[in-house]
Amino acid sequence: MHLQASNKQKLITFRLAAPLILLMAGLLFSTVSQAQNKGKEIFEKNCVICHKLTEEKLVGPGLKGVTERRDKKWLKKFIPASQDMVKAGDKLAVQVFNENMKIPMPDHKFLTDADLDQLLTYIETYKPAEAKKVSVDITKKDGFWRDEILRGERLFSGVLPFEKGTTLNCVSCHAITATDTLNFNPSAFDLAKAWQEPNGTNLYQVLSTPTSAKMTEAHKGLQLSDKEIYDISAFLSDVSKKGMTWEKTFPARLLLFLFMGLLMALALADLIWFKKIKYRIIHVLVLIAGLGIHGTMAIQEGIKLGRTKDYMPDQPIKFSHKVHAGQNKIDCQYCHSIATYSKSAGIPSANLCMNCHKVVKAGTRSGKFEISKIYRAIESGKPIEWVRIHKLPDHAFFSHAQHVGVGKVKCQECHGLVEDMDLVKQASDLSMGWCVNCHRRTGVQFNSNKYYESFKSIHDEAKAGKKITAERLGGIDCAKCHY
């Protein structure tokens, strides 16, 4: 009886204590969860551009296991003011500084003690997200059925609603027709190409869990089923083969040329055979007008033959000179570094891009999509295939070294205001007449340039105040450019 009473007392005690234990466990779990969420927010705002939560090094070392390798008290001093500790001679801080190419870690003195605790808790408890289980073949990139492609096209174009009841016209951001203006959103072909590339875009990941703030905003409330993502993949597979269609411009000049040809033929036929029109002056006027229009158009087209003024091709990466050279004031010769001593201005390598884009991983308007292409190019070992815009005929010699290095000619003189261009185009026709006229009017920095020291007689003219142009130095001699 005594044993039964004891057990009964324990049961009552347990029943009374159980809610309290559950409440305390819930509070503890909630506190840890809040710390993780706050720590994640701090990490993504301040640390993610330099550190990964794996063992992989980015700008700084990977942070996996850092709380086991380093004392937490030391970390809470190092994170806010690493350079202060380096300057003070802290051995471990100096070691970390030297091991990471002496790249200074920015100060984070604004982080409170609680912030640092939450940050370290997040790093310590971080686990990579488990791969989502899907009901379709996410590795499939070819061999889709026609009805799957058509359904994907209709979902992509907003014709069919998604299963969750929402409709989104993807074409409003991701164009399926090519234009001559720069759309920073990737086109359907861009998406298809990035998806097809090795280590490219994971459509199942980005459509179920958007990877950028811009995409998160655009896809707010959108939930796609596995089958819908599969069908959109089928459509993009078809787009990757067919490419983009171009907007057709109305052929006004061609129609005018054909119309005047037909009108002249009718005038001649009536003048010789039909004789329906009484006054021959009408035939004469039609023939004169027609010959004048045909002749003018033939001359204009002949002059433009081989010239590509306003040529503005799409590039493999949507690189905006307006953003880089205009807004960010990057000097032209930082990227085109050989222009002062080489015939060509040079095309920057992907490694040069990475000088900035190791840190800048997302564009203001393009998100991560375009910058990811640089990473994939480096991983694949294949150069980025930029499309050349300015090209002279093979029989014409042109040297950037002579113009930029010696002549001190500004890039804008030939290439236009590239700092105002999102998509660069050929601003000048680069004809021989254009070059000759430039040489006739362009003054040379003669007295201050050692290159011209041997021109004794011309120095006397310069001292007398005469403007020395490129023409005076042989700039319009045929053999200078055609030899």
Image (cartoon, grey):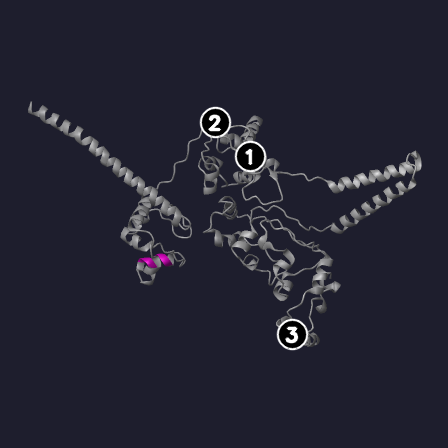
Specify few, some or many for label 3: CA neighbours under 10 Å numbering under 14, 14-19, or 20 or more. few
* Residue 387 placement, left or right of 41: right
Under mark 3, the amino acid is Glu
Q: Are marks 3 and 2 in contact (CB under 8 Å)?
A: no
Q: Point out the stretch of residues depicted in magenta.
A: 92-97
- The answer to which image quadrant residue 36 occupies is top left
Under mark 2, the amino acid is Glu
The answer to whether residue 227 shows anywhere in this view is yes
Q: Earlier in the sequence, mark 3 or mark 2?
A: 2
Question: Which is more foreground, mark 3 or mark 2?
Answer: 2
Q: Tell me the element at label 1.
A: helix
- The answer to which image quadrant residue 182 occupies is top right
Q: Position of residue 471 (x, y in %)?
A: 72, 66
Residue placed under numbered mark 3 in the picture: 453
Residue 236's label in the rendered image is: 1
Q: Main secondary structure of the magenta part?
A: helix
